[in-house]
Amino acid sequence: MIVPQPAQKWHGPSPSSTLDVSTRILELMAESVNWLIQWHKSGYSDPGNSAGFSGGGSSRAPSAASVEDASRMGNLAANMFIKLAEALRKTSLVRREEVRCQSVFELGRAFNLAAAGDLDLGPAGCLACFNLVIFAMVDDLTEKTLEYSRREGAERETRSMEGTLAAAAELLGDVFVLLLPTLAQAPGFRTFWLGVLRRMDTCVKCDLAAGGGAGVMQELVPRMLKRMIMEMKAKEVLVPREGDELWEITHIQIQWIAPAVKDELFPDCLSS
């Protein structure tokens, strides 16, 4: 069986690489998702073996074993995608701002390619993408931004890292909307959504701590929350039902995180 490159241990650009080389490496990493999709759709077959992973050319109905193999291989494809995404995420922490921002951009492109190519991550795979990649990236960049903000004379580095954090926060919202139909099927969706809200809140507080006043996150976070919640409403994931815990928690959290959009998002709760 021929395994595409993402299954191997990925390394991002080296610190000594030129900007052009680093950019091209990141582009190729994102584009390798297309190869992973082809490999996934071909049944994980060797190009010279039309039998696919089932091991034979028979047209008989698949056995229970072959169905189990297909399920296992689907998990393998998701795991390979996550490994690739993790490698891009790690590059978002390098010192060069251009490389960091390119890494975030290519990570978004990788998710869009996976979705366009119907790479089935499943609810568990989607949650893993957030926990291992997107949440981890936002948390790390938040920590780095605050770290620079405490250093004397590091205003330029702070603003630079803050810009990358803003790009990562926007990516969080973009991927959330992209994967929402699958994410909503996960048994732990409520806990996951609280994790999203916590990162949005942290981004706002980090913005204030690093800049000493209203900054880019003060505009970005309400806009991203509005987009995510409107999509949840449209997909009937968030429904205004009496006693609905998800609705009530969201309403309470938005009052603290983004009060400017609360009335627009929850018009039925104006009297509360």
Image (cartoon, rainbow, N blue to C red):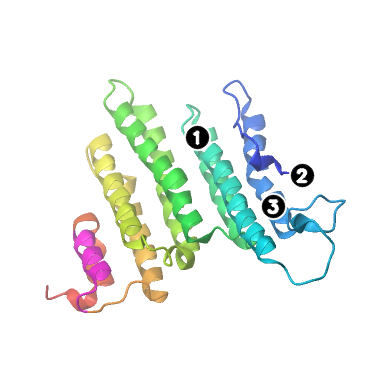
In the drawing, what numbered circle is on residue 34? Answer: 3
Foreground residue, 138 or 118? 118
Amino acid type, callout 1: Lys
Foreground residue, 124 or 218? 124
Packing grade of label 3 (10 A; few <14, some 14-19, many >=20) is some
Q: Determine whether the residue tagged by mark 2 lies in a helix, strand or loop.
A: loop
Label 3 – label 2 distance at C-alpha: 15 Å
Foreground residue, 118 or 7? 7
User: Magenta part of the protein: which range?
Assistant: 242-255
Q: Are marks 3 and 1 in contact (CB under 8 Å)?
A: no
Quadrant of residue 264 within the rendered picture: bottom left
Q: Determine whether the residue tagged by mark 1 lies in a helix, strand or loop.
A: helix
Quadrant of residue 141 within the rendered picture: top left
Q: Could you tell whether 27 is left or right of 192 in the image?
A: right
Packing grade of label 1 (10 A; few <14, some 14-19, many >=20) is some
Q: Could you tell whether 119 is left or right of 245 in the image?
A: right
Pointer 1 or 2: first along the chain: 2
Task: Report the residue marked by disc 2.
Answer: 2
Q: Are marks 3 and 2 in contact (CB under 8 Å)?
A: no
Task: Report the residue marked by disc 1.
Answer: 90
Pointer 3 or 2: first along the chain: 2
Q: Residue furthest right?
A: 48
Residue at image point 34% right, 60% down: 225
Label 3 – label 1 distance at C-alpha: 21 Å
